[in-house]
Amino acid sequence: MVVVVLAVAVSLGAALNPAGLFGGSAGFSVHRLAAPARTRDPLGVRVTKVFGTTTPAKIYSTEIGQMENQGINAKGQLISDLSPIAPGAFRAPVAAYKRYAAGWLVRVSRDIAVLGAALRGGGRGAAQAAWRQTWSAYLHLGAVYGLFGTLDQEIDGMPGSLPGGTSSPQFSGLHRIEMGLWNGESPRSLVRWSTLLATDVAQLRRVLPSVQITPLEYATRAHEILEDAQRDLLSGMDVPWSGEGVLGTAAGVAATDEVLRTLTPLLGGRDNTLVEVQNELLLTREALAKVRREHHGTWPTLGQLTVTQRELLDGTLAGALGALEQLPGSLETTNLPEIPTDPAGR
């Protein structure tokens, strides 16, 4: 039996090494079964560029790496690693904001009616409380300024740019009533200003649906709301009579939250902007809530803030603004312009 197995093994070896069994000098022979393929590319095309770009395929990976790591293109020019967002993608966020604003304008109209009744009643404390409610409701719109012509100035404008300042007959709206209520004017003498205010807000409600808001305007709005709060409200510049800068800032944070909420679908995968902004806004809301708790559930005036509370609000608001500054760049609708390189290499 062993002999038979050995014989078979030898026969197989001979077949594999026909030139001389295992000890021969010749190597294994290979028979060419087919000629090299000469058929054309079945796609009928030669891919030279990556789909959706003008970048040659052979340098695409290099350019992507440079964009992500150094922020430059293959020519060494500054460039963003984020693809531009189609302008049409902003239609849904803007429409959502308009619905939000329309709801708050309904509330503002109701609050103005309460304010007018309080003024006619002659009670200063009740009128001041109604003014706070109305003004806070209006600031919840957040993104209205600069979009409605002179209406915003008439509703919430300060007198600094008017001829005659506070004596100007054009000084009207919420801050004209504020000045009167905190400067000792008779509440009943301010009724005419609340009537005019109601008319202006009604006009704003009519024009809101037709207002055009560009992607750039909307992308920068979230940052500008709190920028104005820092400059005009916490400084006291826009509330010189009531001192209600904390109340106004809280309304601005709420408006910023809403604008960010509408932009959230566009911010997915756009660096880490969304998470950073959300975290900083959370810290700002927590700081505001802490200050309110320390004042027994009411918003303190600027003059009632302790040094520690002031530092807390200033610090968290600065952090939120630092994060919000990234929004416009993360929501670009066009590529960065190419800056020509210096031919001398300087």
Image (cartoon, grey):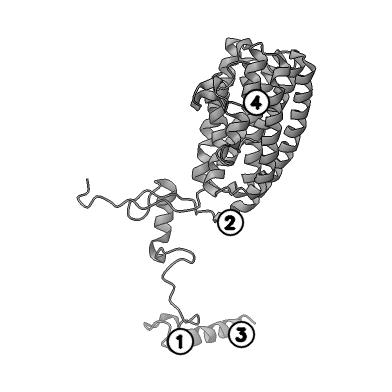
Secondary element type, mark 3 = helix
Between 108 and 223, the one nearer to me in the picture: 108
**Above-or-below relation of 236 to 277:** above
Name the mark on residue 188: none
- Kindly report the distance in space between the C-alpha atoms of the residues bearing marks 2 and 3: 83 Å
Q: Position of residue 57 (x, y in %)?
A: 42, 65
Residue beneath disc 4? 174
Name the mark on residue 39: 1
- Kindly report the distance in space between the C-alpha atoms of the residues bearing marks 1 and 2: 45 Å
- Mark 3 neighbour density, 10 Å: few (under 14) some (14–19) many (20 or more): few
Q: Is residue 106 left or right of residue 207?
A: right
Of the numbered discs 2 and 4, the one sitting upstream in the chain is: 2
The three-letter amino acid code for the residue at tag 4 is Leu
Of the numbered discs 2 and 3, the one sitting upstream in the chain is: 3
- Kindly report the distance in space between the C-alpha atoms of the residues bearing marks 4 and 1: 80 Å
- Mark 2 neighbour density, 10 Å: few (under 14) some (14–19) many (20 or more): few
**Above-or-below relation of 262 to 113:** below
Q: Nearer the viewer, mark 2 or mark 4?
A: 4
Residue beneath disc 3? 4
Residue beneath disc 2? 88
Quarter the N terminus occupies:
bottom right
* Residue under the point 77% across and 14% down: 123
- Mark 4 neighbour density, 10 Å: few (under 14) some (14–19) many (20 or more): many
The three-letter amino acid code for the residue at tag 3 is Val
* Residue under the point 56% across and 18% down: 236
